[in-house]
Image (cartoon, helix red, strand yellow):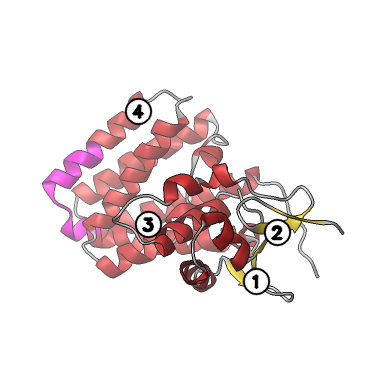
Amino acid sequence: MRRSVSAAGTEGESGKSVDEDKLGWASSRSGADNTIADQVYRRLRRAIVNGEIQGRTRLVESNIARKLGASRTPVREAISRLTSDGLVSPHSSGGVEVVDTQFELDDIYRIREALEGCAAALAAERVTDAELARLRELVEATRNSDPHDLTSRVRINTEFHQLICAASRSERLIQMVNAYREFFIGEQALGQFTQGASVQALKDHEDILHALRDRDPKRAERLVRRHLEHSRRRIRSGRRPIARDR
């Protein structure tokens, strides 16, 4: 089968290439606060998680380094971190291959249910009045948001869940949740929600807020887990089945 090398230093089946501008290499090379390895890592990770670099695409260290005008050392470090994340695996002919995470999404969402459920239980005991007030503002912002403004809805939803995690005051737990953050609901997934599902999600947020306000850890955990389970089922039902290789 004919192979092609993309502008971002990835190799895949013909037509399965990644555009350099889409990954934002130019912008990733600026910013004194971040190392080149961090920039390469974040750009590649985001592209893999978002599906811009598809599963089974081969990443070639030398090609990526050449396109970035960087040495191979930071690229090697970035790829090593992606390997630790389980997003790439060694390729038989050299380099690494992007793992097809579509098979793992159901497991990832189940992990999220457990982690954020635990965070909610801790938050019920530790949340401040100021945080409760902000959660109330986010619930109202959701209620008043334009159903078609997916960008704003995703931002509000993300802040709601992040604030609950932050209120847990557990740095280790927050880090664990953040490790999976990029897999969580984005605009594409939110666009699959029906009007009824969106109304139910809003009610779920209200119920979670009430449990936190009542300082009820068990109820808060149960409600968050149920809310995320509903989201997982909606997203799964909207995904096209993918056949596994045997």
Instruction: Give the labeled residue for mark 4.
Output: 143
| Residue to which mark 1 is pinned | 95
Mark 2–mark 4 distance (CA, rounded to whole Å):
45 Å
For mark 4, give the secondary structure.
helix
Q: Quadrant location of the N terminus?
A: bottom right
Q: Earlier in the sequence, mark 2 or mark 3?
A: 2
Q: Position of residue 98 (x, y in %)?
A: 63, 63
Q: CA distance from mark 4 to mark 1?
A: 48 Å
The image position of residue 45, as x and y in percent, is 51, 58
Q: Residues within 10 Å of mark 1 (few under 14, many from 20)?
A: some
Q: Which residue does the numbered mark 2 point to in the structure image?
A: 11
Task: Name the residue nearer the viewer: 41 or 71.
Answer: 71
Q: Does residue 9 appear to the left or right of 111 in the view shown?
A: right
- Check residue 222 in the rendering and tell me which mark sits there, or answer none: 3
Q: Nearer the viewer, mark 2 or mark 4?
A: 2
- Amino acid at circle 1: Gly
Of badges 3 and 1, nearer the viewer stands 1
Q: Quadrant of the C terminus?
A: bottom right
**Camera-side residue of 138 and 217:** 138
Q: Residue at x 46, y 31 (%)?
A: 150
